[in-house]
Image (tube, helix red, strand yellow):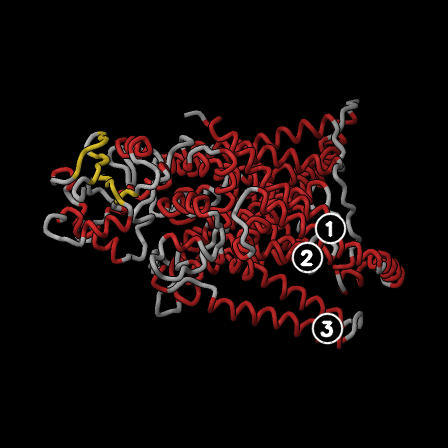
Amino acid sequence: MSWLAITAPFLVGLLVVFIPGLMVAAALKMRGIDAFGIAPALSVAMVAISAIVAPMAGVRWALWVPFAFAALIALLGFLIQRGVDALGGRRRRSARLAAYSDSHDAVASRAADSSLSPLAESRWFSREQALYWVSFAIGAILLARNVTNSVGQPEWISQTYDANFHLNALRYVVDHGNGSSLFIASMTSGNETPDFYPAAWHDLGSLMFMATGVSIPVVTNALVVLIGAVIWPISLIFFARHTLNLNKFGILALGPLAAAFVAFPYLLLNFGVLYPNLLALSITPVGLAVVAQMFRLAMKTRMTVTQTIFLGLFIALGIAIAHPNAMMSLLVLLIPIFVTRGLLQLKAAVQGLTSWIMVILQIAGIAGILWLISYLWGIVRPPKESGGWEPSASQSQSFGEFITNGIMGWPSLWFVTILMACGIYALIRTRNRSLWLLGSFGVLCWFYMAARYLTWDEGRDWVVGVWYHDAYRIAAMLPMLMIPLGALGIDFLTRWVSSSTWLESAIASFRRRGSSSVAVGDTLRSSHTPTVASLVLAVLLTGVLIWGGQTAKPLEKYIHDTFWTYAPEADSALLTPDEYNVLDHIDDYVPEGDAVIVQPWTGAALTYAVSGREVNAYHTNFVDTPQTDMVDLHLKDWQSNSAVCPALESLDAKYVVDFGTQEILNADHSIRYAGLMGIKDTPGFKEVYKSGNVGLYEITACE
């Protein structure tokens, strides 16, 4: 199957991840690349929140629901913005800035409060924005290539443990008309009340499925490409634009760097498979940037307080519903922002530039935020037994892995590591208002190391229980900080080259020989306005970044290895080619309304996702009912156990899939599913469709 098969769901997905968010952002007067950059995070929020609200209002989940909800939120935002404008908030702020500038010198101004930089004008398009769009396009193309190469074919299913749940849940949302995170876990909760489950990814996929009707596996992979090649790079660009002040070369570096790290998005396509985490982490950089703008700790002020508070609230909710551990990750990465802001306010008070009473109140507020993070840390986490990942590296090894981008024992990525190191040096050297990034970098380093080496006796559960004690989920966050640092490294290197005395001497010598060409140093020092020379240098530098990032052997090998976690082979972990063949033909033989008995550990649970026919088990981890328990243990004993046929009747089950004994994770549940073993050789079961040694059987025992 060609990758063109994802075109329809991909285009629907584009509309869903941009239009609702753009409606809300535009209502708050955000424009251009800023509006498009923040739109996916806002759209995820609109989708996830509306999916929870809709069933409460008696509304069935449908494509129009998040758009209508976004329109209401946009109207609310518009009215709030109008109210702020009517009160003259913007005019008063401009007056304060002018008065402040007149009464204090530049040094004192920076020392007192770097938040008082003028607000950058927001436009729908500018030459500077064009550079960001070019960078985004480069990153999107590279990421689309790498993601599709990782997945292999649009109809292939991840051969991993969680694939059963995620693909089945996507169809479950559509079949029940309910995408609420308070409902979706009912798929596996049996007769018990379902717990909260992060359903934003499934909600997005369900809308794409409803609008196009293409198969669930194709929709899944279309959504993976959308997240990896569109949402991720545009969110990174928003983050860099709203925290740093990059020159044109640093801006252009963002796209190639977005595709150059193993840790994201490729890691989460290989391990898990962790689709909800993939979505949540792809928009987390936007949350970081908005808070940096709110606390005025960015190199350039691009958002008003009204925008940061109103939009930030919904972005936080969207990240939390996409996956709670992404929200907790965001909170701990924000701690350096809160601490830095507090220290700056204390410094201003000591210098007599602001009121001690005001500073005390501000410090108290920051202390309250830090206490809240500590409180949430103890409750927003899965049960301990849901994780249980053991330490697997030494302290020194884990530090080396982190600092060289050799996560989880994978070979180091030296090219991007060197650029990242240059960016770190640039931050330390300039000591600008984005220095908090180093604090967040240190926080992330600590948690990654803890997940790799910390023992249970040393507090492993408390420190990394939020992430199921799993270092993979933490490793996936590394690029969101390392990519902006790498771009800052390019910015620093180009500025350093342009200001070097040896270059000036070379330029002078070159000019003395009568050349009228534009000098390299002048080109590097030029503004965002393009010239022929700067375009040539930009193309060359971008080419070097693409080559250096994409030809890295660890990245190439990881993409290759990921391919084989999807490719169906005779010994595949979840689905073999014969099993794929049977799944594709189930809806040809099983009437709608009839259920199919499956052994979920063999991949047969995907019968529901692929064919739409109900099954007794949607995932390997589910709560049994008396009926499913009876069938799983005693189906083939129907002649000697009179309770089997009533159980089948209560489940509307008239067919059974036999995928043999090969299970995911090389597990063995032959005792747990003893009633399903050897069905094909048992009276009362009629072969309907067979491929190799696996097949679909009609249950004739109870006729």
Q: Residues within 10 Å of mark 1 (few under 14, many from 20)?
A: many
What secondary structure is marked by label 2?
helix
- What is the quadrant of the N terminus in the image? top left
Q: Residue at x 45, y 59 (%)?
A: 196
Say which of 396 and 603 sits in front.
603
Front residue of this view, candidates 440 and 677: 677
Q: Which mark is residue 359?
A: 3
Kind of residue sitting beneath label 3:
Val
Mark 1 and mark 2 in contact (Cβ < 8 Å)? yes
Residue 28 numbered tag:
1
- Apparent side of residue 438 relative to residue 515 in the rendered image (left or right): left
Task: Give the SS element for disc 3.
Answer: helix
Horizontal and vertical percent for residue 232? 55, 43
Residue 7: give x, y in percent of width and height.
52, 29
Q: How many marks?
A: 3
Label 1, label 3: how many angstroms apart (C-alpha)?
A: 29 Å
Residue 249: give x, y in percent of width and height: 66, 37
Spatial separation of the CA atoms under disc 3 and disc 2: 24 Å
Amino acid type for the residue under numbered disc 2: Phe
Q: Are marks 3 and 2 in contact (CB under 8 Å)?
A: no
Residue 310's disc is 2
Above or below for 60 versus 375: above
Question: What's the amino acid at mark 1?
Answer: Leu
